[in-house]
Image (tube, rainbow, N blue to C red):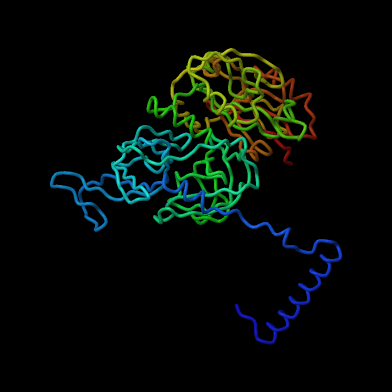
Amino acid sequence: MYLHDSARNRAAQRRSLLAAFVLAAAAVCGFAPSAAAAQPAPDFVELVEKVAPAVVNIRTTERIDPGARSPFRRRAPSGQEDEAPRGEGSGFLVSADGYVVTNAHVVDGASEVLVTLPDKREFKAKIVGSDVRTDLALVKIEASGLPSVRIGDVSRLRVGEWVLAIGSPFGLDSTVTAGIVSAKHRETGSDIAFLQTDVAVNPGNSGGPLINTRGEVVGVNSQILSPIGSYIGISFAIPIDEAMRVVDQLKSGGRVVRGYLGVQPTDVPRELAEEYGLTTGKNRSRGAFVRLVVPGAPGDKAGIQPGDVIVAVDGRQVESAADLRRTLGAMKPGSAVNLQINRRGKGMDFKVVLSEAEPQTAQAEPSPAAPDQRTSSAAKTWGLSMADLSDAERRTLRGAAGVKVVAVSGGAEAVGMRAGDVILAVGTTDVSDLKQFDAVIAKADKTRPLPVTVLRGNWAQFLRIPIVK
């Protein structure tokens, strides 16, 4: 929208007056700009010339069923499948003999990987290994005497420091963008704590290097946070120390071997942390809440139950679910570890031998069970009707105990509870049968939400049930 001429002139006059006022005020306060205070951006020319020759473009194709043909498909010989362009990304050489680091999502599902060097030489690449959990891959081209990057020290990287990205956004190879480190150890729910930057990164930059002002690679550009699918100011890179640990395993064995406990952890809800005394001095929760234990896995064999909170591994405090996954994943299968557990406010210790098995797919949450007629009215204040578990139902709890929800209304319905759920504990008190549950409920404060640990199928969660009148 444009302003009329008269309005535009008045606005210009106001801006001039405001600028004069700001400059005058700055001079009075001693903040007047000076040549000495003006700090120019660093000169990136030399470090780009040093690093760019080792940054590559990666194109992939995928096999397509023969059928309706497209002008964008590579026509295959008779009797063979067509190949179509699948995607494009970036990577960087970490050795003179042709090892290239990139993102797993750049090469996953590809039937052919083509690596193009800045000097326009093109090579077919072999996928040495790929790790989806960290989104890293290692590919190899048959060449020697190639330029390679220098690996930096992430621990020396500081928030506010200048960094560069080199890659192929939208297929524009050898594109250089610059910005600063916005944050370190940014949690996004991944197995990795990312470097956050404001370097312009777009589709096609994936797998390219993040470079410090010493010309060293400090990260692998991997993700952006954007509602529109392209750069809006928040980019994430995998720290290079984490990346190289993965790359070393991919190079030696083609895969990443991790320790496996066999639990599905989530961050500890604030309400549960307050109930169990798991808040830190900054009023933040600590530990990892066990939502599910995989039957037969090491955690199950050791006696860990859904609803437990893992607070330490070998004496090292667990800060979050992601922290637990990273800590255990860094250990070798066969390692014996000591886990400190908080079970409904009580400290317990378990010794677990980690396995190598990949995490199994968790069972789907079951459909609500049809309510039976065995009910208790003691918990009606919170909208609950309860019943004892049958012997068969008790056996499915694998050492735990509880009482079954047979109908919900009011507050229980409002927080999402449903028939068939099992209440394992009220606050920090375990409940093993309806008589004990009624006794605990009778002493509960009827003016406050009721804290309960609930099991649905194999999944545990902590809830506070409000009173709804």
Q: Please indicate whether residue 284 sits to the left or right of residue 155 in the image.
A: right
**Residue toward you, 364 or 447:** 364
Q: Please indicate whether residue 177 sits to the left or right of residue 123 in the image.
A: right
Identify the residue at horizontal 24%, vertical 57% (top origin).
70
Q: Quadrant of the N terminus?
A: bottom right
Q: Within the image, what quadrant is residue 123 found in?
A: top left
- Image position, residue 19 (x, y; %): 76, 72
Q: Is residue 169 above or below residue 303?
A: below
- Image position, residue 199 (x, y; %): 55, 52
Identify the residue at horizontal 54%, vertical 28% (top origin).
264
Q: How many marks?
A: 0
Q: In this view, does 209 lie above or below 1?
A: above
Q: Is residue 15 above or below residue 239?
A: below
**Residue toward you, 104 or 390:** 104
- Image position, residue 229 (x, y; %): 49, 54
- Image position, residue 143 (x, y; %): 31, 38
Q: Quadrant of the C terminus?
A: top right
Identify the residue at horizontal 62%, vertical 24% (top origin).
307
**Residue toward you, 264 or 394:** 264
